Image: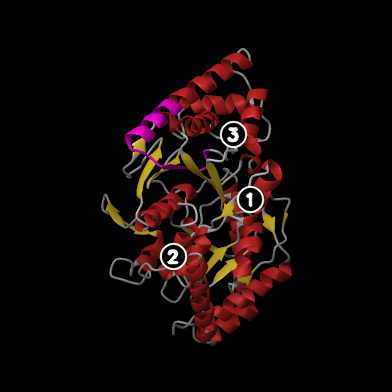
Amino acid sequence: MNIALCHFRVGETDGVSLEMEKWKKVLEKMGHKVYLLAGSLGEEEGIVIDELHYQHPINNKIVQNGYERMYEYDSVNPFSDQLFQYASQIEDALLKAIDRYELDIIVPNNIWSLGWGLSAGAAFAEAVKKRSIRAVAHHHDFYWERTRYGHPTNAVVTGLLEEVFPPRSNLIRHVTINKIAERELSLRKGIHSQVIPNVFDFDAPLWELDDYNKDFRERLGIKETDILVLQATRITERKAIELAIDVVAAMQSPGLLHHLKKQQLYNGKSFGDEDQIVLVLAGLSEADDRYIPALKKKAAANHVKLIFVNDRIQASRCVQNGDKHYSLWDAYVHADLITYPSILEGWGNQLLEALFAKKPVVIYEYPVYETDIKPLGFQVISLGNSHETGTDGLVQVDNQKVHEAASASIQVLIDPEYRADMVEDNFNIAKKYLSYTALEKLLSKLF
């Protein structure tokens, strides 16, 4: 079949773009012809509909006036006119693409769920009706999960959210990425969906030390005998990176440091008086201006060494203007421990990466982890599932949980057999349930 995977943007590092690439690979392996259709393609090839661009000025205007404050239109009528005129442009371009590429199925990603593209949602719904084309709606994020979409300024927006996000049609099948979203879609809209989790290519070559990445630590000023704790996520408030600082601070308590120093590490090296536990933050900052200063202040107060390395990390290895850049995978190779203390995730891509990298993980048990991932049987170092926000705006968990996690972290650093059993079991579980092979089995029911 000819299939178009559709979104506002592709070829970027956002979670939706990454999952679309995975679906594309698996669907092509199944024998389908797969196109990418979006407002921008990055470095990818595909079909461009300019009006779908994530930051198109007309769409930005509709979003601002439709959800924040109606200040650029005299009344609802001109707002509605522009919204549907814009939808008509998208619809015309989409119909031409359906005809030109003889598409059998379209797969809108977030177009019928997020509420960002009101015109796009209406356009895709009309195109399905006019061409009687099948659609598989892949819902990564819903509008009711985001506060910005919670207060429409007029009845036109409210009506569209009810009727088109997502639309009800016998031609449309729905996919959600976790059980919580599946339940909410059923309760709110009466729509049944199939849960398809985010996946990773567990058959890919393992990331290993090589000639390119062997100097990673040296170039960052980290010794071979230092403990490298990696926070691989983007830097944003819901990632609760302050909990990683708490764990590292607790690992540096005299009693735990004594254990670390008196025994060989899992890799045969020794941790001495001159060595440090270093928390490396690899992701791009998308946080409020106050968040990173708050993290730095907390780290300094707890004598935790933070290193921000995003300026050294690119999507793939490269040398730019004489500066050597590493991939995120190179950072995983050198990590001794991964922290993943997010309090909210739609799934958890960095968790999958850590499992593939065969590294132990410190995790906060966020809701989707509890409902969808924990039942699979992974062995993780847990910070529990309960938190509160302190007066400084940072997330806190019970001190006992932090100290238990720190103690367990020391254990995986000094007990090679325990560590190996943990990471190998985790890898095998993930390969069984969260691999491209598992995805192919699920997609075969839809395509």
What segment carries the magenta color?
A: 90-111
Residue 101 included in the magenta stretch of the image: yes
Q: Nearer the viewer, residue 48 or 131?
A: 131
Q: Position of residue 400 (x, y in %)?
A: 73, 71
Secondary structure of residue under mark 3: helix
**Residue bearing the label numbered 1:** 181
Q: What residue is pinned by disc 3?
A: 164
Badge 3 crowding class, 10 Å Cα cut-off, few under 14, some 14 to 19, many 20 or more, is many
Closest to the camera, between mark 1 and mark 2, is: 2
Q: Nearer the viewer, mark 3 or mark 1?
A: 3
Q: Which mark is residue 14?
A: none
State the image quarter where residue 165 is shown: top right
Say above or below: 409 vs 308.
below
Q: Amino acid at mark 2?
A: Thr
Magenta stretch holds residue 151 = no
Q: Is residue 179 above or below residue 130?
A: below
User: Residue 418's spot in the image, x, y percent?
Assistant: 54, 84
Q: Is residue 60 visible?
A: yes
Q: Residue at x 59, y 83 (%)?
A: 259
- In space, the residues marked 3 and 1 are separated at their CA atoms by 17 Å
Q: Position of residue 25 (x, y in %)?
A: 37, 55
Spatial CA span between label 2 and label 3:
32 Å
